[in-house]
Image: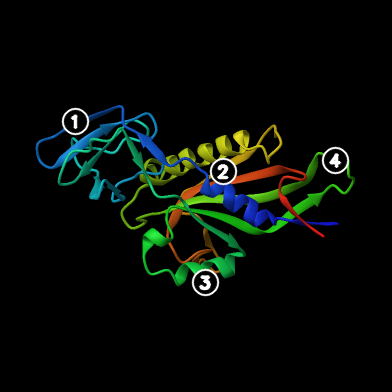
Amino acid sequence: MSKNRIETVDVVGSLVAAIDTSVNINEIVDNGDNSYTIFTCNTKYIKPCIKFDVLGVTYNVIDTEGKEFVPNRQFTVQGSSIITETVINLPPMNYFYGTVIATSAELDKKKFDDDKFPMVYLLEVINDNFNNLPQDKIDRVSDFRIFFLTNTDEKNWLTADHYRLAIKPMRNMLYQFIDELNDNPNIEEFSNFTAINHAKFGVYSTDKGHTRRILNDKTSGVEVRLNLPIVAGQLCLVCN
């Protein structure tokens, strides 16, 4: 019998899909003008202009004087009625993988930002280091780079805005991803990972002084470099 291993891009995709994007409401205050301030310990990927639905009502996150968005503390939404639920279930992160050129072309075909952001981008090429002995507990250790990115307003944002409105929300999702890895039986324990902040992700200057960007979309977020140990046996299909 042979083992048809599940590819690493699919393993990571299943882990991304399992990331907890729910926001617990500790307290909600009715501001009396169809806006409601929500207090929570983790705002996940929420930022101003994000929209989400609760029981058929659409809410828009705002960021105005007296109703500022504060990561992992509070945010204010506008909607036709107060939220009576204790948990907001945000849509899952969008997942992309591939080379920069291929992924950029794929993103360009997406008509709406909601179909792209917030996004988890697994950069290829991936180095899979396989163990081949039957007694090996670990099937492979995958050395990869993965990015947690959201769209930005480069024209109007200062560096502090990139951190408050993009990097901190994406850091939240990175930590949720690590929690998912730690709790998943298909992943062996790992001792460390590297996180790198990217304000204005992929923007660089050429030798002639021209500004170029890796992706056409304007994004900020956090990069993670990780050697992921994947357990043998549980992530393969056995065929006769």
Say above or below: 42 vs 120.
above
Circle 3 sits on which residue? 105
Circle 2 sits on which residue? 196
Choose the circle earlier in sequence order: 2 or 1: 1
Q: What's the residue type where badge 3 is placed?
A: Ala
Choose the circle earlier in sequence order: 4 or 1: 1
Say above or below: 131 vs 26.
below
Please state the horizontal and vertical placement of residue 109, each as a whole percent of the image: 45, 72
Q: Quarter holding the C terminus?
A: bottom right
Between the C-alphas of marks 2 and 4, the distance is 32 Å
Horizontally, residue 69 falls left or right of residue 78, namely right
Does dot 3 land on a helix, a strand or a loop?
Answer: helix
Between the C-alphas of marks 1 and 3, the distance is 43 Å
Between the C-alphas of marks 3 and 2, the distance is 25 Å
Quadrant of the image occupied by residue 65: top left
Nearer to us of marks 2 and 1 is 1
The tag on residue 136 is 4
Q: Residue furthest front?
A: 240
Q: Residue at x 55, y 69 (%)?
A: 208
Nearer to us of marks 4 and 1 is 4
Choose the circle earlier in sequence order: 3 or 2: 3
Horizontally, residue 129 falls left or right of residue 37, namely right
Q: What's the residue type where badge 4 is placed?
A: Asp
How crowded pointer 3 is (Cα within 10 Å; few <14, some 14-19, many 20+) is rated as: few
Q: Is residue 207 visible?
A: no
The answer to whether the residue labelled 1 contacts the one labelled 3, judged by CB atoms less than 8 Å apart, is: no
Quadrant of the image occupied by residue 71: top left
